[in-house]
Amino acid sequence: MNGRISLEQALELLLAAAEPAAPHPLPLAEALGLASAEDIGADHDVPVQARSALDGVALRSADTLAASAAAPLLLAVNGHVRPSTEPEHPLEPGLACRVLTGAPLPHGADAVAPDEEIFLAGETVTLTAPVPVGRGVRLPGSELARGTTILSRGQILGPAAAAALASLGRTEIHAVPPPRALVLAVGNELVPLEEARRARGPLLVADNLLLLRGLLLESGVREVEAAVCPNEPEVIVRALRRTEADLVVTTGGTGPGDRDFSFSSATSAGFNPLFRGLALHPAKSALALRRDRSLLFCLPGTPPAVFAAFHALILPALLALRGVRAPQPRTRALLTAQLKGSERAQRLTPCSLALEEGRLLATPLAGVLGPRGQMLQAHGLAVTPPGPGQAAGELADVLLLPGRQPETGGSSSGSVSSPDQSPEGMSRPMGSGWK
């Protein structure tokens, strides 16, 4: 596609091109953090039978109605059930059964009197008050009822869902395997991370490798290869031809200069363009290409542009590659200061977020902090449409950064007083485009 396109158009192309790997069965422990390829519900109750929630004695509530401090009730104890054993016989009227926490109740028992409220001497228990039906009992399905949805297709298997599946006796699920990633920092001036002390004069440490590696790992990628790549067409082509990664990201060499080889090298390596250039700052020279199932992103070389482009472009495509159906979270927040715009392009501006008196406030960090400081302090990226920008007090669209929570109760520079405006829900999704 020729010409710079909008972020919305780019996302539509990317999400249409992103194809997850074929799912296969994985043990629950290995599937943690991966997207399920199936809908899974509870096929039985947990627990499947009534169990004791206390250490005490199981009994029939009706047998205890006359118990009082003035007229204590004595019941014979018949049997002892532990969590790992089954009751040997039903509980007859007028009898009690010693039980430990988690033990299955004998048939006929409908209550448990806790140790703290009884007196146990040998094979006799003394009660000084009635024990109501259901006291100290975990009923069948009280933890997990049959038919409960545990995991939906496209949902990430988290710890709670994995534990629930294990309680049902499930040992594995069909999951989408995580994509493999390759990161190349293109540039003859770049020094590998392990040689950072050589960064003198014109030489620069390739910190984009660490930035992207970290962003990919925290976004669900488990295998990331990262390397410095000389800015020589034949070297770039060779690296791209040999890779079998599902997701490839290069930094540098995306401009129109005679030493910018990213696009030509990518096409020589067999990748087909999805888009070439965006009407978006600070990633206007970003490129995206596809070869079979592999997606290739060629990003500008500056870390702030890499940071913004990753969250706005790569992350949505990465979620699709992982088989995750949940969209990127975004919200609207009240601006505490003016948000700069661009006449012919959208703009991504790092901003901090704060919850104050039920309002979500966004403070643009551009002009307040340097580029790296903005990356450190940002909770989200404000998305400004083409035009002059937005004024303090207006509602801005904000793309939320994963794992970064807004501050609560703190002060924000440039306070906003807007009695009727409140932020939209923090979980408002972003689909293929922003509306």
Image (tube, helix red, strand yellow):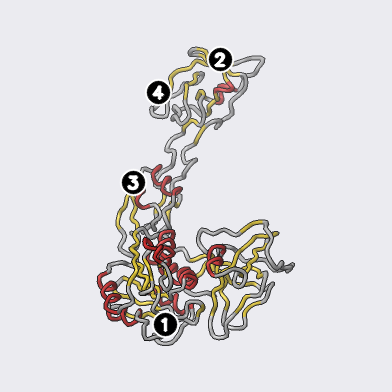
The x and y percentages for residue 274 are 37, 79
Amino acid, disc 1: Gly
Residue labelled with disc 3? 171
Instruction: Tell me how far mark 2 sits from mark 3, CA to CA.
Output: 46 Å
Other-residue count near label 4 (Cα within 10 Å), few / some / many at <14 / 14–19 / ≥20: few
* Upstream in sequence: badge 2 or badge 3: 2
Q: Residue at x 49, y 36 (%)?
A: 139
Instruction: Tell me how far mark 1 sits from mark 3, CA to CA.
Output: 50 Å
Residue labelled with disc 2? 74
Image check: 351 left or right of 248?
Answer: right
Q: Is 403 or 125 nearer to us in this picture?
A: 403
The x and y percentages for residue 394 are 67, 73
The x and y percentages for residue 429 are 52, 67
* Upstream in sequence: badge 1 or badge 2: 2
Amino acid, disc 4: His
* Upstream in sequence: badge 4 or badge 2: 2
Label 4: element kind: loop
Residue labelled with disc 4? 89
**Residues at badges 4 and 2 in contact (C-beta under 8 Å)?**
no
* Upstream in sequence: badge 4 or badge 1: 4
Label 3: element kind: loop
